[in-house]
Image: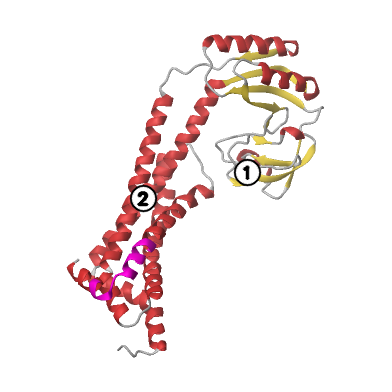
Amino acid sequence: MAQMDKFQINELGESMIIKNIRSFLKSHLTFFIAVICLCFVSMISLYYGYFRFLESRITTEMYGRQNTVFSVEFDSPVRFSELSAKISESSKKTTGKANAVFLLLNDEQKIISFERGQNLIVSFGRNFTKDSEIVLSSSTKLKTGADIGESIKLLGRNFKIVGTRNEFCDYNEIPFSSIQEDDEIVSVYFQFAGIPSERQAEKISDYLTEQFGEFSANVTAPKKSSDISGFVNSQKLITALIILIISIINLIYICRYMLDKRKYGSAIMRICGCTKNRLTSSLLAEFLIYITFALLAAFCAFKCIVLPLAFENYIYGIWNYIIPPLVCFLLLAITFLITAAVYAKTSPVRLKREGRES
């Protein structure tokens, strides 16, 4: 047996993954089903916790905007050349200093632009890097049929589409530097870092009215919400993080437990001449097959059942579905490699004895 030739050893290693799975199913069918179910539930929980975290972050952002934005709306569109100096001065001198200023341009499609380049969430593609580029809203994409890589004519000129955004936001976005003097502005919004006090809000409103009053502007201060959205949102965030941590710990535990169940078989393979690297790679491949199967099932269940029921107000991009399994695979791979390294240093005889005891 010790003199087994290389061909036999390689053949053993190449087919070991299938043999392990077949043997495992015969002797541990109940355990296999339990592992798949646990992985499935953990993956669902991982997705749920991550999407709750995203929802919490978006809700916090929207809650902050609702309570920190002063709007200056004009009775009729005003040319940008008449407003640019006042916008720049107002963003610097308003009490509390605005951390974002964005303009709504006069166009059939809703077009918005940030003075300091802050971009809204991009679901597909990327943010713009040139004046001739645009991030398209999903509603405009549906109306025009335009998509990433194509050009679209807005404001009387062509823009190259480099990204699209979810239905969560109905605005197209262009670089502030691309706005021309003849472009017409419908509204100007000043967003602040924190919710202003009533006294601060009154001062800011008076200042903006003085600055833009000549254009028949209507200045609206943010209405402080009386609900407990901020508190509830923080509770959701904590809950999401707890779910994420528990799901990851559970998956790591499953990984360790499955490796412990392999001690006896691993010892036999080592005694028969299987190298440490081949043993490690076959065990890793086998475990990834189980996890991938559970992940695909969990993804389908989450996408088709959980998401429409629990997250009907939010539509996410493809990367939001990819990040959780990537993090999961990374953590499990680290756990596996650490455990495998410990096994590699352990003598086959000891592994065999520990495997029998487990």
Foreground residue among 348 and 198? 348
- The x and y percentages for residue 230 are 43, 26
Quadrant in the picture for residue 127 = top right
- The x and y percentages for residue 120 are 60, 36
Which stretch did the figure color magenta? 337-350
Residue 248 shows which numbered tag? 2
* Position above or below: 62 against 321: above
* Position above or below: 274 against 259: below
- Give the label, 2 or 1, closer to the camera: 2
Q: Amino acid at mark 1?
A: Thr
Q: Amino acid at mark 2?
A: Ile
Q: Is residue 112 left or right of residue 68?
A: right
Q: Is residue 291 left or right of residue 72?
A: left
| Residue at the image point whose x is 27% and y is 61% from the top | 257
Quadrant of the drawing holding the N terminus = bottom left
Magenta stretch, overall SS: helix
Q: Residues within 10 Å of mark 2 (few under 14, many from 20)?
A: many
Q: How many marks?
A: 2
Foreground residue among 353 and 303? 353
| Residue at the image point whose x is 41% and y is 49% from the top | 302
In magenta stretch: residue 342: yes
Instruction: Tell which residue pokes out farthest to the left in this image.
Output: 357
Residue that carries the numbered disc 1 in the rendered image:
164
In magenta stretch: residue 195: no
Distance Cα–Cα, label 2 vs label 1: 32 Å
Can residue 122 be seen at all in this image of the molecule? yes
- The x and y percentages for residue 98 are 62, 22
